[in-house]
Image (cartoon, rainbow, N blue to C red):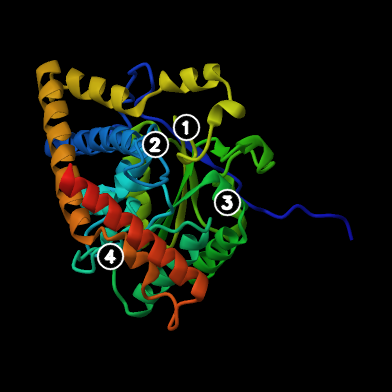
Amino acid sequence: MPREKIDLEYQVDYLSILDEKGNLDKDLEPDIPDDLLLKLNRAMLLGRRFDERLLSLQRQGRVGTFAPITGQEASQVGAVACLRSSDWMTPSFREMGAELWRGKAMETVLLGLGGFNEGWPEEEPHNDLPVAVPVGSQVLHAVGIAWAMKYREKDDVAMTFLGDGGTSEGDFHEGMNFAGVYQAPVVFVCQNNQWAISIPRSRQTRSETIAQKAIAYGIPGIQVDGNDILAVYAAAREAVDRARSGGGPTLLECVTYRMMMHTTADDPKRYRTEEEVNAWKARDPITRFQKYLTNRGLLSEAQIKALEEEIQSDIQGALDRAEDIMKKFVDPMHMFEHVYSERPSYLEEQRQALAEELAAVEKEGNHG
């Protein structure tokens, strides 16, 4: 018998509505209310300025290591804005912008990065899981939640975020396969920021796009300009509506760029060039969107300045509240508690040495 071609539809669309030069495709422009457009702008700007403040605090030793989001604000905010409060979100470790949109307080972010378990208070009623540091593990969580919601005949949706490096993990493929088979209402948002720590996207996969990986699992996939919040919102809106109406999962590949380090323990200058970074700076999602809003008469330079001042005030207020809370819990001696039922002798020696040192410091302070 001769070979026969199997009739398969292989097609992946690329969506860009507002490019880096400010060119707008009016035919594709999504219908977004003015108040939501301004809210999206504020959310992206808040994410950027909070990111910058966190980096300053980390370099001062006031918070621990974290993963900056600068450059990826549109990919996060544009997607998560399509969810309602009853929907679920499972982040990786670089979705601070999406978490703030969903209602996470900045002071809880600061507490978490400071090493306090109060960084995710149980009283916050969000259908969001904590950050997932193991790469790709959050994908399985999202699919499981989505399948449970479908089983219970709810019309809620789960959205999970991952990086391009996450698509190299087995968890990603298992999650995609399960979601496709069971038509789980889940949206996979891949922030393709070009780098998995120091490994470029070109060395992670031979696929021309990440979006095409959806085809193997029988689900829709689309590649969007991840620095164009209009395109991200439009694609995410379509995917969320599809999932909510019983149409199953979607893979969104948001092509963006990690403007800063992988985490604050990383030095990106060792593996990428300034020329590459500068080229992507010209595609800045916030600058692009603010020009769009200005052209529409929704934003002025004076309003941008006032918003910047308001955001800085909000960040400082959150920092002050977080540090007030930290003072209530900061007792170095607590590190020796609740670890062993019977403290080992070497640990007891360290505990005693620290107690004596703290007592000496306090005595010196009292006499100073």
Say whether disc 2 or disc 4 marks the residue closer to the N-terminus.
2
Give the quadrant of residue 89: bottom left
Looking at the image, which is closer to me, 317 or 308?
Answer: 317
Say whether disc 1 or disc 2 marks the residue closer to the N-terminus.
2
Element assignment for label 4? loop
Looking at the image, which is closer to me, 364 or 273?
Answer: 364
Q: Position of residue 182 (x, y in %)?
A: 49, 71
Residue on which disc 3 sits: 167
**Residues under numbered marks 4 and 3 in contact, where contact means CB atoms less than 8 Å apart:** no
Say whether disc 4 or disc 3 marks the residue closer to the N-terminus.
4
Q: Residues within 10 Å of mark 4 (few under 14, many from 20)?
A: some
Element assignment for label 1? loop
Looking at the figure, which quarter contains the N terminus? bottom right
Residue on which disc 1 sits: 257
Is residue 297 among what the camera can see? no
Q: CA distance from mark 1 to mark 2?
A: 6 Å
Residue on which disc 4 sits: 127
Please report the residue visible at 23 percent of the width from the left and 69 percent of the height from the top: 122
Amino acid residing under circle 3:
Thr
Amino acid residing under circle 1:
Tyr
